[in-house]
Image (cartoon, rainbow, N blue to C red):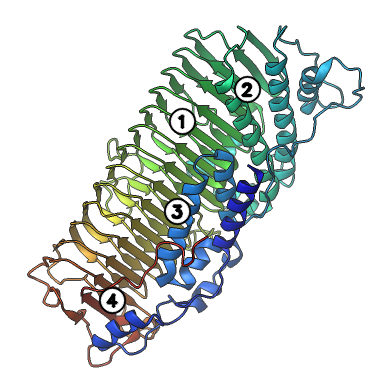
């Protein structure tokens, strides 16, 4: 187990190091070089203007994996494909997967299961009333200033030594995690409360030049301490789950106790329970079809820890308030782990693994489940990390905005679905967050989206973006979104979507399916040979990069259908680098725009500016099959090589490098390892 975790940790560490590659600056792959030579392109840079990226006021906030994508756009399939491989290897252990997510934040800390020291309150002696009593005493003292805290009652666990020991182990991990949480937030002023943080960072309601501004405090969050505490907490929860699933003679216990850190509820009766809880610390329920309703009191505490483990049954989880869900972490930690059953999760905002200045985990081990939330949910992180892991069943994820692998500044958010025919929907009713591009459509910012905060037109307090990713490892899946989704990046953020196989459908409007804007990165990989249906009704999608960004769309094979309004299929706009690659199958391309701004197209919207002399590239490759191209596009055709439409063809500008290639040959892009381990 330990060796496996360390392999994952070391490999994840390698993924975020921006080492030089064969395609770091220009095109040096011989096969691709020959293809471009046939199109009349002899030498070209494929990196957005690095000087502008290095000169960014938020340079120190840019995450390493984002920089690696920006520094070598043509290497994106390999780098993201290797990340997908690591995710697959780690999917059987939430703790191992947490190490991968933590590595993407750029923080190097690898605490392994079993490293948690025994937690005792001051004054403990060897003849104290047992390990569980000591753990409860430590929890009581953990938030009681100037004293040992209240005396907490012990559960009646006669003839249940194993359960007593496992409960003590988990409570000890909670004590240690609380110490790490306090250390991670030690530099935060007392004025920063969870309620203030949600107003500013989630609701976006800022007062100009507020004295307490989360944007100025984000660099003071000690990410290493935050991750260390979460690693201990997840390892201990994983151990408890393994114990409960393996135990066949658990005693019937129904016990609860109020502590300064929240209520503890232990129920092994197997009854169908109805729990109504306010900010619980620990809930363990074994058996039964249970119903949970959660509320929160954000105004009375400065962050919290919450762990819920439910073993078996068809359960219902309802979060009445924002951040009330046990897997919501605002200035703290949140874990919700359900082992089996067809479950339903309902919430407003900040739920179903959502973290702001914290870390969160939602694990669903079985059953076909339905997740419903308005937004900032189902894997959302800002200043921390959020992880959703669903390992079985045909699941439905339904939200409106900032969900399903959505990361803001300093955040990493992963949604990993291992199996099943799943449905992902970022809907449009009601209209909750109108997008700038289409005011009648919601800003999705999910299904693998990373965004920064752009404030250059306000008060200048911008923030570089995070990394949001969705990995669906198998099944025939259906994705629906609106604006900014499905491998989309904004303002120095990176969005990734990797679908591991099956016949899938993708629908969106604008900035989707490998799309990026304003020094951002968007990567979309469809692996396997399933038939894909891709539809982007409006613009800048399916391999399109705008304003010094990079985007890479790759479909590994199958007979696919593509529909696009305008600007994509390998398009670089205003010095972006956009790449589209379909590696096989009989495909159909439909491009509605009359000007044919796609299939290998690059342009600058501000002629006569310095942008004309900077890199701008659109690259389209179809590497097999009998394909159909739109009649309005003169260049596209089977077995052809063409140059995209240029406004100034006689100048051969580096900002107008558009190339299309339809040929039968081996792909120059790798999505897996170069060597065998």
Q: How many marks?
A: 4
| Numbered disc 2: secondary structure | strand
Instruction: Give the residue pinned by disc 3.
Output: 84
Instruction: Give the residue pinned by disc 2.
Output: 282
Kindly indicate the quadrant of the structure image that contains residue 141. top right
- Mark carried by residue 602: 4
Residue 172, given in percent of the width and then of the height, sits at 74, 28
- In this rendering, position of residue 607 left or right of residue 58: left
Residue 336, given in percent of the width and then of the height, sits at 53, 29
Instruction: Give the residue pinned by disc 1.
Output: 365
Please tell me which of labels 4 and 3 falls first in the chain. 3
State the separation of the CA atoms marked 4 and 3: 30 Å
Kindly indicate the quadrant of the structure image that contains residue 235. top right
State the separation of the CA atoms marked 2 and 1: 19 Å
- Mark carried by residue 541: none
Please tell me which of labels 2 and 1 falls first in the chain. 2
């Amino acid at each position: 187990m330990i060796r496996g975790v360390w392999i994952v940790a070391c490999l994840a560490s390698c993924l975020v190091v921006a080492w030089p590659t064969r395609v770091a600056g220009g095109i040096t792959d011989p096969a691709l070089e020959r293809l471009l030579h046939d199109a009349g392109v002899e030498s070209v840079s494929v990196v957005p203007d690095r000087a502008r990226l290095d000169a960014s006021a938020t340079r120190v906030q840019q995450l390493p994996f984002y920089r690696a994508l920006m520094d070598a756009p043509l290497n994106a399939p390999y780098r993201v494909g290797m990340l997908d491989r690591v995710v697959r290897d780690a999917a059987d252990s939430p703790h191992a997967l947490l190490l991968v997510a933590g590595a993407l934040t750029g923080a190097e800390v690898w605490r392994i299961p079993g490293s948690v020291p025994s937690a005792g309150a001051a004054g403990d002696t060897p003849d104290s009333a047992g390990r569980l009593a000591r753990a409860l005493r430590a929890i009581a003292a953990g938030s009681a200033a100037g004293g040992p805290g209240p005396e907490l009652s012990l559960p009646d666990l006669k003839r249940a030594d194993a359960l007593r020991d496992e409960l003590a182990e988990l409570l000890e991990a909670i004590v240690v995690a609380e110490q790490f949480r306090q250390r991670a937030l030690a530099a935060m002023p007392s004025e920063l409360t969870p309620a203030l943080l949600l107003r500013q960072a989630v609701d976006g309601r800022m007062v100009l030049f507020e004295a307490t501004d989360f944007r100025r405090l984000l660099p003071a969050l000690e990410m290493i301490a935050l991750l260390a505490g979460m690693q201990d907490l997840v390892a201990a929860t994983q151990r408890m789950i393994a114990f409960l699933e393996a135990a066949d003679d658990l005693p019937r216990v129904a016990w609860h106790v109020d502590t300064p850190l929240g209520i503890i509820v232990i129920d092994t009766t197997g009854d169908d329970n109805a729990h109504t809880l306010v900010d619980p610390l620990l809930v363990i329920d074994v058996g039964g079809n249970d119903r949970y309703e959660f509320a929160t009191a954000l105004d009375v505490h400065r962050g919290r820890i919450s762990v819920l483990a439910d073993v078996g049954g068809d359960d219902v989880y309802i979060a009445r308030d924002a951040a009330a869900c046990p897997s919501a972490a605002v200035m703290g930690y949140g874990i919700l782990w359900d082992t089996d059953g067809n479950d339903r999760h309902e919430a407003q905002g900040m739920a179903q693994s959502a973290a702001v200045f914290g870390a969160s985990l939602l694990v669903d081990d079985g059953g076909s489940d339905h997740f419903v939330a308005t937004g900032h949910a189902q894997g959302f992180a800002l200043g921390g990390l959020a992880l959703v892991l669903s390992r079985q069943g045909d699941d439905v994820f339904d939200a409106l905005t900032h969900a399903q692998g959505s990361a803001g500044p300093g955040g990493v958010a992963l949604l990993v679905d291992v199996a099943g025919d799943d449905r992902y929907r970022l809907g449009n009713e009601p209209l909750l967050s109108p997008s700038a591009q289409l005011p009648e459509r919601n800003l999705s910012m999910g299904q693998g989206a990373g965004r920064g905060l752009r404030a250059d037109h306000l008060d200048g307090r911008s923030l570089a973006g995070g990394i949001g990713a969705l990995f669906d490892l198998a099944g025939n899946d259906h994705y629906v979104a609106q604006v900014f989704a499905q491998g989309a990046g904004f303002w120095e953020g990176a969005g990734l979507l990797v679908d591991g196989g099956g016949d899938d459908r993708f629908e969106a409007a604008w900035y989707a399916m490998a799309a990026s804007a304003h020094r951002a990165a968007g990567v979309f990989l469809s692996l396997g040979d399933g038939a894909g249906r891709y539809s982007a009704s409006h613009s800048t999608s399916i391999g399109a990069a705008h304003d010094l960004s990079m985007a890479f769309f790759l479909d590994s094979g199958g007979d696919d259908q593509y529909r696009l309004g305008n600007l994509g299929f390998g398009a670089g706009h205003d010095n972006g680098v956009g790449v589209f690659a379909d590696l096989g199958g009989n495909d159909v391309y439909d491009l509605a725009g009359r000007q044919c701004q796609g299939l290998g197209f690059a342009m600058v919207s501000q002629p006569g500016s310095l942008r004309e002399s900077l890199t701008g590239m659109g690259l389209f490759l179809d590497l097999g099959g009998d394909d159909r191209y739109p009649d309005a596009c003169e260049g596209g055709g089977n077995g052809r090589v063409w140059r995209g439409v240029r406004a100034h063809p006689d100048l051969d500008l580096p900002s107008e490098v558009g190339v299309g290639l339809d040929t039968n040959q081996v792909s120059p892009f790798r999505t897996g390892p170069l060597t065998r381990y």
